[in-house]
Image (spheres, rainbow, N blue to C red):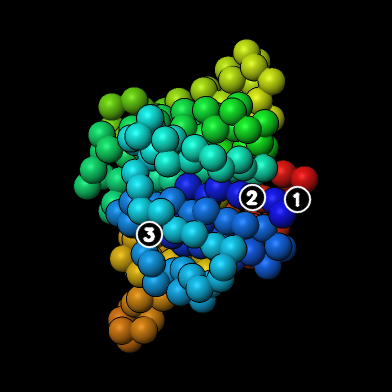
Amino acid sequence: MKKALVTGGAGFLGSHLCERLLKEGYEVLAIDNLYTGSKANLASFADNPRFRFLKKDVTEVFATSACFKGVKFDEIYNLACPASPVHYQARPMFTTMTSVQGVLLCLELALRDGAKLLHCSTSEIYGDPLVHPQEEHYWGNVNTIGIRSCYDEGKRVAETLIADAIRETDVDARMVRIFNTYGPRMHPQDGRVISNFIMQALQNKNITIFGDGSQTRSFQYCDDLIDAFRAYLK
């Protein structure tokens, strides 16, 4: 039976990934500090004997890695990091360290076990892009000292660490840059556009469109993203 580790496993996307892996017959260990995640997201499969949850912070790299002695993973998915401005701007230094220390933990375990590693990055690595849509060869238009930089730069450093580890070691690591994703278990107060629309609609309020209406966004449903995760790691 294959074993998978999911960091950020109690979050919106992490919980959907855990659910999918369990349906595919995996044994799953999810770790999450519950800063933005919730045990309620795990309720539909928490009693599955192949699932285990560990409340732990990935910023404690060495203390956390000690929890995995005697467990060998086949696949590791790194989703740990607050992803909405409301949450990451409330704890900016913690957010940056979650990205950096989290990926170091996952690389350590992937190298130890010979596991495949999927690191979840973000469209925010492009900063305030001057090119639309963004293609992978575009390097972005970034601000290292703004109020969003804790998230953007943390994710950029994490990508650098993954890329350098691939060049320096035999680690089997891949990266995905996630754009706007929506679906069940979204945090209702994450401050992002789809959740704002839904909450305003439920409260019979006007739907707020910022600016002159010319902004563009790409949206994907959570199940489609999980499909992509699974296809990419195979």
Q: Do the residues labelled 2 and 1 touch (CB within 8 Å)?
A: no
Looking at the rendered structure, the number of numbered marks drawn on it comes to 3
Q: What element carries label 1?
A: helix
The residue wearing badge 3 is 37
**Spatial CA span between label 2 and label 1:** 17 Å
Which residue is painted at 55% across and 47% down in the image?
A: 5
Which residue is painted at 44% across and 69% down in the image?
A: 41
Which residue is painted at 42% across and 41% down in the image?
A: 67
Percent position (x, y) of residue 82?
A: 37, 48
Amino acid type at circle 1 is: Ala
Amino acid type at circle 3 is: Gly
Q: Quadrant of residue 143?
A: top left
The dot on residue 3 is 2
Q: Is residue 154 visible?
A: no
In the rendered structure, the answer to whether residue 126 lies left or right of residue 56 reads: right
Percent position (x, y) of residue 219?
A: 57, 59
Foreground tag (2 vs 3): 2
